[in-house]
Amino acid sequence: MNKRHIILGIIGFISLAVIILIGMGLKNFKPDNFKPAAVIFVIDSSASNQKELPEQKKVLRQICNTLDPEDQVKIIKVSEDAYLIYEGAPFNGSNIEKVMNEFTKYNSKDYGTAYGVGFKKAFNYAIQMKKNGYLPAVVVIGDLENEGSVEKQVNWEALPNEVKRVQQTAPDFGMMFLYAHPSKLDMVKETLYPVLGENKLLISTKQNCDKAIRQFLHILDR
């Protein structure tokens, strides 16, 4: 009886080990056409967007959690000016939280929204990351309001040509816009749909963010 128990125990142990190894293999499996992504976030930390910012930062982290270890992220904060505050792995949650808490603090003087500057930086990073072997995408989180210095705001008439410039290097380039008012998102759709098409452009109000985040993986060809 003891011998039988020992044999059954050995068989059970081997079976468990095989299951674990198979599970690890499936977890690390990547299809032959897998491409690491470079996701460039443009997040609005201006005074007018502060009310929504805590929830938007959670959405940014939620998107990062859907990415792969091989992916890279960059975060550009937009307010009176626009500049890079983080670049690195998507799963470096503590560092992402630290830099966002530090550099997106409320400042009554940061009333302007330099989306135009932020977009140019994001597009340049997208081109460079494509040259480095990544599939680039830009995620814009904010209200898309034009405030402050006119020269730093988005030129919506010129925006399609700026996206086309990125597509010359990165034909698989995609964009997602979250949290803006439906009127702003409708303008985005009318402006960029002819350039990006249905599969590479996503827009969503805050009410449908969860669905948009799930669909975002399709922009990354996953």
Image (spheres, rainbow, N blue to C red):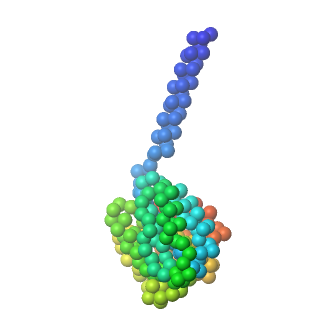
Residue placed at 53% from the left, 83% from the top? Answer: 109
Total count of labels:
0
Res 203 quadrant in image: bottom right
Q: Is residue 35 above or below residue 174?
A: above
Can residue 194 be seen by looking at this rendering?
no
Which quadrant of the figure contains the N terminus? top right
Look at the picture and state if 107 lies above or below 148: above
Left-right relation of 48 to 74 = right
| Residue 206, image x, y percentages | 63, 70
The picture places residue 51, in percent across and down from the top left corner, at 63, 74
| Front residue of 98 and 119 | 98
Residue 189: where, in percent of width, then height? 55, 78
Q: Residue at (55%, 16%) from the top-left corner?
A: 7
Q: With 211 as the anchor, is 193 left or right in this view?
A: left
Looking at the image, which is closer to me, 63 or 158? 63
Q: Taking the image as drawn, is residue 81 in sight?
A: yes
Residue drawn at the location 58% of the way across and 19% of the way down: 8
* Residue pictured at 50% horizontal, 79% vertical: 79
